[in-house]
Image (cartoon, coloured by chain):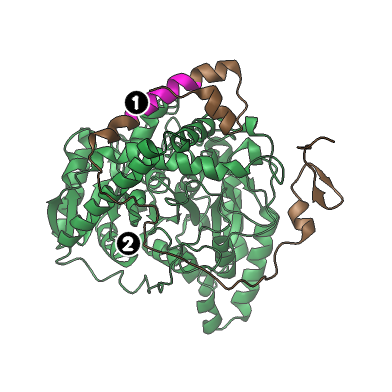
């Protein structure tokens, strides 16, 4: 196995036992990027010099360090990639847009600082649908990303580059954001684990804002255990983000291997009744069988307002987008607003319209009320079950170009993911099989701040299946 | 339901070309027609949700602390003068 194919857990073990160095691990990733990224287009920026400098520093810590110090750096020497929404001091941060194509932040996002402090090596910034506006990766102003499993197909978006880079073993983990499914969908399409934590669990400070009441900061990893390791680093209250509550961060690894005997898992009938690709329905059914085999009690639940979720989301999100993108006026940073791509322009106009005088009550206020109904659906369901399991996408990955000219069609791909953002609840997308050699994931959703439970359920499922061990042929 | 695209674009400071206006008019109408679906729901007496985890009145002490230097702040602008951002005049003499 090449070093870049390792998981975080395996790499930590190897580094500790001095089987290889962080410099060797980092070089393996950089070489992989050089070899295949021209095909995949996952990275906008690679910072080779900074990465190797940090890897050298990590190796020094490893040779001088004590066990105590080892525990203080949970990601020591581990090469990761960052979605290009995360402000990185002195390293170009573009949000995937021409408007910011030469913007160099003078500060690090809180999460970036936490990852650096944990010892991580930053390989570079991954591409995305510009401003996180998209579900396929095709809205990047720097070219679409290809799905490493079949390059005629989309990797999912908006965190397209992060998911693809990880699936192709160009890094050992990658960060993302999920406002309406932008981690869970690409994770599902690329056969990796995608974590969307509870709203406010991870600080949004320094991360280019899309929709401030919906944005969740998360990550991609190759295994569930790695996902827990990563969240332990990024989670926590931040004085710079007043939407992060003063809730302690539990030991995510402690609950991981408990098993799921007796755990009640609900599947929403509205998600499987109609509009679901029959092969996805079949695969989903098989996943339920695996969980039953592990001792879980599977029941049907109802989320009655599901059919209104997209309409609700596509009023609230563009409204907040129009507000957040108002700061890009070319005065302090960035270029002129004409350089916004089509999708950004559409969302800005839609949002401006629904917030404008005479329309605010009919659209935005109405959507906020429907949001309450959707949130209540989940609260009600969670009185009956411990977690909810659902498909991530109504269809398998689609071909590049297939939906890009029909914005509404593209929006409808988000039907199973937007609900978690509207309710502010956490979700974990995990590999669950293949359809025509393209990955299809499932997602586990839980009440707010129940990430431990999601890891527990996902770990049990993962260890019972082989999906996470499959790699694309590149 | 139609959006007055030139009006909305002006509100949003988005200079658009003529061809763009036509294209967006069509696409935005389709989207607006879809989101009108929410009118099927009775939301009388339902509280709107904007803060989804129940936080309220999060404050801090009114103390200043070290922040970005003036040089850092000016690093990314295309137009500066004597340590200020330079912009087009709003008022004329």
In the visual, does B59 lie left or right of A281? Answer: right
Q: Are marks 2 and 1 in contact (CB under 8 Å)?
A: no
Q: Position of residue A104 (x, y in %)?
A: 70, 50
Relative to the observer, which residue lies in front, A350 or A121?
A: A350
Circle 1 sits in a helix, a strand or a loop, which is it?
helix
Using the numbered discs, state the Cα–Cα distance from disc 2 to disc 1 in whole angstroms. 33 Å
Q: Which residue is mark 1?
A: B33
Highlighted range, magenta: B24-34
Relative to the observer, which residue lies in front, A87 or A184?
A: A87
Decide: is A424 above or below A360: below
Circle 2 sits in a helix, a strand or a loop, which is it?
loop
Classify residue B38 by image quadrant: top left
Please give the chain letter of the residue carrying mark 2.
A
Q: Position of residue B61 (x, y in %)?
A: 58, 73
Determine if residue A438 is in view.
Answer: no
**Residue B32 painted magenta:** yes
Q: Main secondary structure of the magenta part?
A: helix
Residue at screen point 54% across, 68% down = A239
In the visual, does B66 lie left or right of B47? Answer: right
Residue furthest to the right in view is B82
**Residue A144 painted magenta:** no
Please give the chain letter of the residue carrying mark 1.
B
Relative to the observer, which residue lies in front, A300 or B2?
A: B2
**The chain in green:** A
Decide: is B88 above or below A298: above
Residue at screen point 68% across, 34% down = A336
Q: Position of residue A352 (x, y in %)?
A: 50, 35
Residue A448, disc: 2
Residues marked 2 and 1, same chain: no
In the visual, does B15 lie left or right of A199? Answer: right
- Mark 2, mark 1: which one is toward the viewer? 1
**The chain in brown:** B
């Amino acid at each position: 196995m090449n070093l870049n194919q390792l998981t975080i857990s395996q790499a930590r073990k190897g580094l500790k036992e001095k089987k290889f160095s962080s410099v060797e691990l980092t070089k393996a990733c950089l070489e992989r990027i050089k070899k295949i990224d021209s095909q995949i287009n996952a990275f906008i920026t690679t910072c080779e010099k900074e990465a190797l400098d940090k890897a050298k520093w990590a190796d020094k810590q490893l040779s001088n360090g004590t066990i105590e110090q080892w525990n203080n750096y949970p990601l020591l020497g581990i090469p990761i990639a960052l979605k290009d929404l995360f402000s990185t001091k002195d390293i170009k941060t573009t949000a995937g847009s021409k408007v910011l194509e030469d913007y160099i932040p003078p500060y690090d996002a809180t999460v970036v600082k936490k990852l650096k402090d944990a010892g991580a090596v930053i390989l570079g910034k991954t591409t995305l649908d510009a401003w996180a506006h998209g579900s396929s990766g095709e809205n990047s102003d720097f070219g679409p990303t290809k799905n490493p499993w079949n390059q005629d197909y989309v990797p999912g978006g908006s965190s397209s580059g992060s998911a693809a880079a990880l699936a192709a073993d160009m890094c050992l983990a990658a960060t993302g954001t999920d406002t309406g499914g932008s981690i869970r969908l690409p994770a599902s399409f690329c056969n990796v684990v995608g974590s969307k934590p509870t709203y406010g669990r991870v600080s949004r400070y320094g991360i280019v804002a899309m929709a401030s009441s919906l944005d969740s900061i998360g990550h991609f990893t190759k295994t569930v255990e790695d996902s827990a390791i990563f969240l332990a680093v990024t989670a926590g209250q931040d004085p710079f983000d007043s939407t992060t509550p003063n809730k302690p961060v539990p030991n995510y690894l402690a609950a991981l291997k408990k098993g799921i005997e007796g755990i009640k898992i609900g599947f929403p009938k509205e998600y499987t009744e109609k509009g679901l690709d029959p092969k996805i329905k079949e695969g989903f059914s098989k996943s339920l069988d695996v969980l039953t085999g592990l001792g879980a009690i599977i029941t049907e639940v109802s989320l009655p307002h599901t059919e209104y979720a997209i309409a609700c989301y596509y009023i609230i999100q563009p409204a907040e987008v129009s507000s957040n993108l108002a700061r890009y006026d070319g005065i302090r940073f960035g270029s002129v607003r004409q350089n916004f791509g089509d999708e950004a322009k559409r969302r800005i106009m839609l949002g401006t319209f629904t917030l404008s005088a005479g329309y605010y009550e009919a659209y935005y206020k109405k959507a906020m009320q429907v949001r309450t109904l959707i949130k209540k659906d989940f609260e009600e369901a969670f009185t009956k079950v411990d977690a909810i399991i659902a498909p991530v996408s109504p269809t398998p990955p689609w071909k590049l170009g297939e939906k890009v000219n029909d914005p509404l069609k593209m929006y409808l791909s988000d039907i199973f993911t937007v609900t978690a953002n509207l309710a502010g609840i956490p979700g974990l997308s995990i590999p669950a099989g293949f359809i025509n050699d393209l990955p299809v994931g499932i997602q586990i959703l839980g009440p707010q701040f129940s990430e431990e439970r999601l890891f527990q359920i996902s770990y049990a499922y993962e260890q019972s299946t082989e999906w996470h061990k499959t790699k694309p042929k590149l | 339901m139609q959006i007055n695209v030139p009006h909305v674009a002006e509100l949003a400071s988005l200079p658009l070309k003529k061809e763009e206006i036509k294209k967006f008019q069509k696409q935005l109408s389709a989207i607006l027609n879809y989101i009108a679906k929410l009118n099927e729901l009775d939301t009388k007496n339902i509280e709107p949700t904007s803060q989804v985890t129940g936080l309220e009145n999060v404050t801090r002490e009114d103390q200043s602390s070290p922040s970005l230097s003036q040089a850092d702040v000016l690093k990314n602008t295309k137009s500066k003068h004597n340590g200020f951002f330079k912009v087009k005049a709003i008022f004329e003499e």
